[in-house]
Amino acid sequence: MDVRVVTAEKLGFCGGVRRAVEIALAGAGAGRPAFTLGPLVHNPAVIGHLAERGVRVVDDPAAAAGGVLIIRSHGAPPEVLERARAAGATVVDATCPVVRRAQAAARELAAEGRQVVVAGDPGHPEVAGIAAWAGPGARAAATAAEAERLELGERVGVVAQTTLRREDLEAIVDVLRRRVADVRVADTLCAAAQERQDAARRLAAGADVVIVVGDAASANARKLLAVCRDAGAEAHLVESAAFLDPGWFSGKAVAGVTAGASTPDWSIKEVLRTMEEMNEPGDVAEEKPSGSEGSSAAGGDAGPAPEEAGGPAAEGTGEGTGEGTGEGTGEGTGEGTGEGTGEGTGEGTGEGSDVPMKPLKAGEVTRGRVVAVGQDNVLVDVGHKSEGVVPLWELSHQHVTSPGEVVKLGDEINVFVLAVDGPEGVLRLSKKRADEEIAWRCLEEAYAEGTILERRIIEEVKGGLIVDVGIRGFMPASHVERGYVSDLSQYVGKAVRVRVIEIDRHKNRVILSQKVVLEEEYQHLREETWKTIAEGQIRHGVVKSITDFGAFVDIGGVDGLLHVSEMSWGRVNHPSEVVKEGDAIDVMVLRVDREKEKISLGLKQALPDPWTDADTKYPVGSVVAGKVVRVVGFGAFVQLEPGVEGLVHISQLANRRVATPEEVVSVGDDIRAKVLRVNPGERRISLSLKEADQEQEKAVMREYMSDQRRETATLGEMLGPALEQAKDRIQSEKKRTTRKRAARAKVEPEAESAGKDGDGGEE
């Protein structure tokens, strides 16, 4: 085939993806397990490259416990970030800054009371993440037809998936404005994505066939494909050079090449090299369309060279932007025939070709492999004529005693070239300077965009704390918390969320603040609370301070007063009897005064009312136990349970006349009283000590009589034998008496007869 290859002005890695890859590579060298929440970008080559360096893909934040969890460029919902931190993972946010702005816009629109519609693919993780920041009412639509089917409120806010085509966004907005009167649109389209689409459109206009290099799962790659086809060109999406079909180029004069924002430089170069090999030698001249910014053939925004990105080196693709395609590609190719295809290793494939060494210059950052670990230095192969030396003191900005604390054999690391040929003819390198170089770029970007960084505190110093942000960042004591902190040592070793508030690279100074992050969150929370708070709500809060008359409770950036009278259904002498500082409690909002910014809270209202079933727990006629809590002139109040008190009237205190209640009861006495009346509605119970005593006396009498009956029956049984014996004795006595009488009756007649017959003597 004889095809002229033309590349788009803008293609390959965008700034957000490049940043995410650099963050992931830095995370892989942090000495802890590194994970990405889902694929970092939609490109298998990049994911495979990261996996080789120990960066694993996980779907559950809990799987990153104890390690470093990198949030991919698509972003993540806020609850996912919280789950990751709760699991003990150190969260490194690699969310694309443009996506982060879209998340912030969605949150702001929702805070205005608008229903948020995300214009984009509902199944795309970026869209799902943006919608999550807007709350549960958010909806998504990828087309105008989908927007027609949405259920909408009276006020709508629109944000767009960052890679959406502008014409698709405008079509969706037209539908929404036709259906809803109040529509506010936040322009969240990525300028870089639009530039790539415009460049692809111009490329397609002058090409017979266009090759889009990217993964089919990449939204921006699919959109580039659609743009090229809409421009009237034949277009094909390929993941790598292996997917190229020579038949696509048959009879074509011009072939264009573009690539999605997730496509690494080395994949683009591989495709270009393969297309070159499909041509007859010497017949192809690759050129840039007019308007090129002098970038490599991989595009001005294609990201770092393969060596810098840590990817596989492209073989035989030339040494620069204008050196040609010939060096090291084999016998007879000469110096090349046109503009080069970017930096490569240029490994020769023909006879007599030399392997060119990697060009290096002092001050640049490159990537190499650790080939030896000594006691006080490390040797790194960076493709130069000799290995470079990294001294111990150039390995880390933290204090280390041996190289093994930082790297191990086979590690791939970024290094800064201190000198190509030092005094001893040695290539001198610094890992510390490379890490600092990358860190400075990240910090400058974070400062410009106001990004929140999560980093670890490594040391306490006079006046503040040192935070590891790739370099030593300083956080003044006044910027640690919203209030005063007396003991800074408690923060050493902990991860904090900070914002860069001052940066001066020339003075090597970075000032950080956690306070501004907390203040912003507190203010946002406070505004949200005032917007949504209403009387009757149950709110979760934290006790901030206690006074004699109550406690102040933070219910979301706003302090409400919990008066002592509203703490319990029972009597409370002092608030400290119920709550203490730091307690997390649920309270009911009793009154809201927005003008004076005052809120009254109740704790007992959030608890069950003990009077609800008082008539069931204390039925009329029952005798209940209680404690005397107050004595007044007309009687005594008795607490049956916290919140439930009954009155014993003076007339019901005793069976006798009582002049004062103190004659019978005192505060603190435990008594038993009979329930006379119960009225839960009026929260009243009438009690009688007198009738309870009478009930007690009756109970004692009944028990005594019952005992008496039991004792009589028992005595009868016990005395039965004795009675029988007594009966026998009585019968025997009767018999003796009868015999005596009979004997006397017999003697008396004889004596009478003798008297008559005798001398008449005295009886």
Image (cartoon, grey):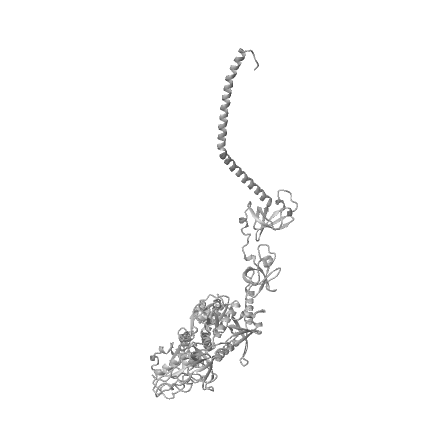
Counting from the top left corner in percent of width and height, residue 556 is at 55, 65
Up-down relation of residue 180 to residue 391 (above or below): above
Counting from the top left corner in percent of width and height, residue 535 is at 56, 60
Q: Is residue 35 left or right of residue 518?
A: left
Q: Is residue 175 visible?
A: no
Asked whether 160 or 737 is in front, the reply is: 737
The quarter of the picture where the C terminus appears is top right
Residue drawn where x is 35% and y is 78% of the image = 242
Residue drawn where x is 58% and y is 74% of the image = 463
Counting from the top left corner in percent of width and height, residue 44 is at 40, 74
Residue 213: quarter of image: bottom left
Asked whether 323 or 715 is in front, the reply is: 715
Up-down relation of residue 370 to residue 638 (above or below): below
Q: How many numbered dots are placed on residues in this image? A: 0
Asked whether 710 or 233 is in front, the reply is: 710
Q: Is residue 697 visible?
A: yes
Asked whether 191 or 625 is in front, the reply is: 625
Residue 559: quarter of image: bottom right
Up-down relation of residue 385 to residue 626 (above or below): below
Residue drawn where x is 49% and y is 28% of the image = 727
Counting from the top left corner in percent of width and height, residue 440 is at 50, 78
Residue 218: quarter of image: bottom left
